[in-house]
Image (cartoon, rainbow, N blue to C red):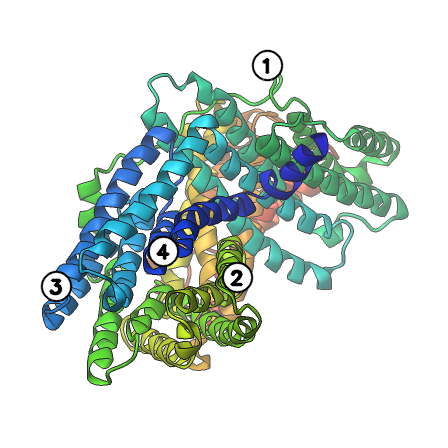
Amino acid sequence: MRTNIKFFRDVFLLHPYRLFALRATISMGVLAVPFIIAGLPFFGVTLALGALAGALSETDDHPKGRVKSLSITILSFFISSFSVGLLNNYTWILGAGFILSTIIFILIGGIGERYRAITFGSILVGIYAMLGIEISPAWYWQAILLPAGALFHGILTLILIFRNPWRLLDQQMANGFRALADYLEKKAQLFPSDKKDQEDINKDLALLNVNVVNALERIKNVLNNYASEMKNTEALNSYLQRFMLLQSLHERAASTHQRHDKLGNSNEQIEILEGFGEMLRQLAYASRMVAENMLTGTPYNHPPALEWISKAIDDKLKTMPVEDAQDLILLHHNLHRSHVSLKYLDNLEEGTSIPRLRRDERTPWQRLKEQLTLRHPRMRYALRLSLTFALGYVLQIYLDLDKGQWVMLTSLFVSQITYSDTRRRLFERLLGTATGIIIGAALLQIFTTTAAQVLLMMGSAMAFFYWLRKKYSVAVIFVTTFVLSAFNIISNDGGINIMVPRLIDTLLGATLSFLTIRFLWPGWQYRRISGLISTAMEKNRNYFQAIAKEYKQASNDDLKYRIARREAHLADNELAQAWNSMRQEPKSKQRIMENALTITYLNHALLSHLSALGAHRETHIESYKDIEPLFQQIDKKLNEAGKESTIKEDKFSSDLSELLLTLQQQIKDTEAGLKRQQLRLFYNIAATTSKIIDELKRSGIH
């Protein structure tokens, strides 16, 4: 019994995607197998497709919120499939209605995450209904079976959720700690490192930081979803505390006090840097243990190695000359505080405080109204996708394509909001479909009995759900083998017969998706860079001002500070993602590739220095009056550098040379110690801001 429990924990509880895949596959199997055995394969497969669409429409909600979401999902699925059946004989009315409803669904999905998944599923069900209408015993059956399949899966999910209502929140929290662990492990490679290695490591850190910040955003949204459905939110306190811990750990992890190749030259310093690297790896391990605790409920055991590594570093620093040790003291203090925070994970007195969370105060109508302009990315995406559907629908009719609805199905999965994401999905879809057809054809020659093909269909479904959020190209392989086996069950050799049409339709759908985004609002990244830099510098300045306020007088409620920090990281993410997306664009559109990379790197470095200053805000190294002039001068330069009008000018007024010289002299005249280290942080912030300004001058970005 213990062995079975351990197996289930290791295989499924620790890997939520596997558990999701198992749950979805079970619901599909329970629905499909009895009807297939009874000789009614159409009913079984259609119910299974409804369950599949229902699984793709799941939202991360409190159980009460899930009930509301499921109700909306079933209603949307019914309307979508019923409309297809009702209008099937009115070809052009059906096409026009489907295209118009696509625009409406996409815009409704922009209201929030809850609606986004549901509306995607509704469009998917509409295409499924078009695919199956010809083999349906009557026009209305799909309007019954597809929602019924989704309802069954939804009820099964609700039963499991009500047994463990905190599971969804545990999963998101665990994802956050795992993302942080990946970041910490990569950062450990900087200790020690030389200058030539640091550039590649810092590029990876900027992209890993995107994962951490996105995970924090998802956790915040789920926490707010839970809070909105609960009368008494006291039960959320432990989650709020861990969310606060994760944010503080991230701020310290993102901190950079000094360029890493300058931290140590002597053997003693290099030895301490190696200790820092090991400490970061142990903190990463501890973060993974917190994630395991969230997922399985097993007790969190703090790594004992962190205690003695930290003590060994501290002892070593005490024996070193102050001049050599000063750059390492704040770094050790930072890592030690992360160790202590994890050690007192759930201790309300020793651990982190319980925060307030910012909520989106906009009404659903306000959020929908914001999208009703051609400048909004989601409106552009809705129009592109609907145009792709329109072209696919016309081709299906005039070329008399067999199962031509797959053109639209491919477009739905390939079309994304950005050019780079669409291009990536296109290749993944084509490669996955071609591979899936080859594998599926071979397997159907082996699995010739109905029972074997049912096993192939269920196995393919489980593999599809598992890989869907991990590697899309692999997921496409298995969804292709799923479709082939499903059609083979409904009609003997039906799976074999649709292989070539499936590949042709996939090529057409992918091509249409690519052409629409290539020529209709492609949103080339080089046009966005100037605005993204301006926003990033503005948010960096807001973060800097929030740090200054905390130095002046520490607040009991640091919500405004955390909002400023979060927005600075989100702006940094946007810049990093824009540069990453630019790499997927045509060579002719990569006009400022190197400049964008340099500015992205420098902005992340600036944010790291700001994080270091913010991470030490409660230490009160010196009174605020002594450092207030520095805050004011740097704030002024950040403001000037962030103004779009300044960026567009030939000459920048943000000359920081005088301030840098002043700081250099102050550092030189100040005795080794905390005050000098603090001055170094100000120098690093000012110097990095100066480098950003110089790069903007050279690149002429505007």
State yes or no: discs 3 and 4 in contact (Cβ < 8 Å). no
Quarter of the picture containing the N terminus is top right
Q: What element carries label 2?
A: helix
Q: In the rendered structure, which disc, 2 or 4, sits on the residue that comes first in sequence?
A: 4
Q: Is mark 3 on a helix, strand or loop?
A: loop
Q: For residue 679, what is the image quadrant?
A: top right
Instruction: From the viewer's perspective, tell me whether residue 189 is left or right of residue 76.
Output: right
Question: Furthest-front residue in view?
Answer: 38
* Distance of label 1 from label 4 (alpha carbons): 51 Å
Question: Furthest-bottom residue in view?
Answer: 399
Which is more foreground, mark 2 or mark 4?
Answer: 2
Task: Identify residue type, mark 1.
Answer: Glu
Q: Residue 12 carries which label?
A: none
Residue at image x 37%, y 49%?
A: 51
| Mark 1 closeness class: few <14, some 14–19, many ≥20 residues within 10 Å | few
Task: Identify residue type, mark 2.
Answer: Leu
